[in-house]
Image (spheres, rainbow, N blue to C red):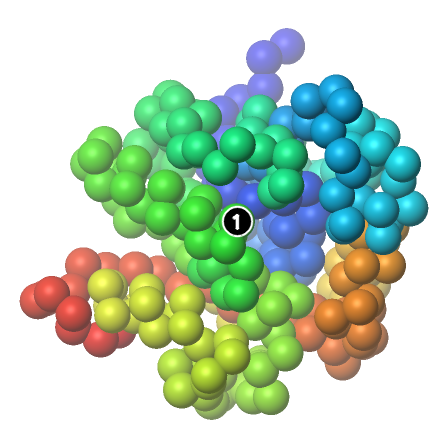
């Protein structure tokens, strides 16, 4: 049986980004929900294994890719989401070219589908996905997407999850540049602001732990990543509207 078309699509740069950033909110989105992993392609045979994959314990990029696909399958099953995997190889295994498979996927998507894209905080791959999606949607004449905060990156803001989040984010030297860039181009409005309950956190933790191979390198820069009160504790999504004049702040 052919599955129904998605009502909600999340562009996830890497296999774990949708779960890290949105696992608490996914059950509240219009269903069916589809997670589209952009950097989901296998590396070419013989490429030197990346630092990241070595730190994860893998001997080759191919081994890492197979493990991550299996992890993603388990996590999406827990989240009740369908999976689509695009063919761009991850980070150091790619050629740095345009993310042309986003173009094809979005062109084939029903215009009424709700799309979520990453903010792009402190992660070049996320920014590239964001900008490609915005460009393609503009060319297609489609509605602007929702934008979600990239976790754990954005979640290290001291005010994260509080009423001062956006103000603090706009003024923060380390975690604010992506937000300031978007707010300079569009009017932004918070449409989802979730601090996870204990039950929601337990469900999110289970989904995130499916990506067990990634936790060792994540802990290097985000040592409290799995703490109940850590950077994953709150999730945030903004809507975008066209600015009334170029450069108008959100």
Q: Can residue 181 be seen in this view?
A: yes
Determine the secondary structure under disc 1. helix
Q: Count the labels in the image.
A: 1
Q: Which of 33 and 132 is in front in this view?
A: 132
- Residue 191, compared with residue 18, is above or below; it is below
Q: Which of 69 and 221 is in front in this view?
A: 221
Residue 75: x %, y % from top left = 77, 42
Judge left or right: residue 246 versus residue 130.
Answer: left
- Residue 181, compared with residue 111, is above or below; it is below
Q: Which residue lies furthest to the left in this view?
A: 245
Residue 97: x %, y % from top left = 44, 33
Q: Is residue 31 visible?
A: no
Q: Nearer the viewer, residue 116 or 59?
A: 59
- Quadrant location, the C terminus: bottom left
Query: Residue at coordinates 64% horizontally, 10% vertically from top-left?
Result: 1
Query: Residue at coordinates 49% horizontally, 37% vertically from top-left?
Result: 96
Residue 61: x %, y % from top left = 78, 33
Residue 118: x %, y % from top left = 48, 54
Query: Residue at coordinates 56% horizontally, 44% vertically from top-left?
Result: 13
Judge left or right: residue 168 versus residue 181.
Answer: right
Judge left or right: residue 197 versus residue 234.
Answer: right
Residue indicated by mark 1: 125
Query: Residue at coordinates 37% horizontally, 28% vertically from top-left?
Result: 103
Residue 206: name its quadrant.
Answer: bottom right
Judge left or right: residue 207 versus residue 19.
Answer: right
- Residue 137, compared with residue 185, is above or below; it is above
């Amino acid at each position: 049986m052919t599955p129904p078309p998605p009502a909600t699509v999340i562009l996830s740069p890497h296999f774990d980004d949708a779960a890290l950033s949105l696992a608490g909110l996914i059950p509240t989105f219009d269903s069916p929900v589809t997670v589209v992993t952009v950097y989901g392609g296998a590396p070419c045979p013989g490429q030197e294994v990346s630092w990241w994959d070595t730190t994860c314990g893998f001997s080759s990029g191919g081994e890492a890719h197979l493990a991550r696909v299996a992890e993603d399958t388990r996590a999406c099953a827990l989240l009740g989401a369908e999976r689509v995997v695009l063919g761009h190889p991850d980070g150091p295994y790619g050629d740095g070219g345009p993310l042309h498979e986003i173009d094809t996927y979005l062109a084939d998507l029903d215009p009424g589908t709700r799309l979520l894209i990453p903010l792009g905080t402190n992660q070049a791959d996320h920014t590239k996905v964001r900008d490609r999606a915005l460009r393609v949607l503009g060319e297609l004449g489609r509605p602007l997407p929702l934008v979600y905060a990239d976790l754990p990156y954005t979640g290290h803001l001291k005010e994260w999850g509080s009423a001062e989040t956006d103000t603090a984010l706009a003024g923060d030297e380390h975690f604010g540049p992506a937000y300031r860039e978007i707010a300079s181009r569009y009017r932004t409005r918070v449409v989802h602001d979730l601090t996870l309950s204990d039950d929601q956190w337990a469900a999110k933790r289970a989904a995130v732990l499916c990506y067990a191979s990634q936790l060792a390198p994540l802990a290097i820069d985000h040592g409290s990543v799995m703490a109940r009160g850590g950077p994953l504790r709150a999730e945030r999504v903004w809507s975008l509207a066209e600015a009334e004049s170029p450069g108008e702040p959100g």
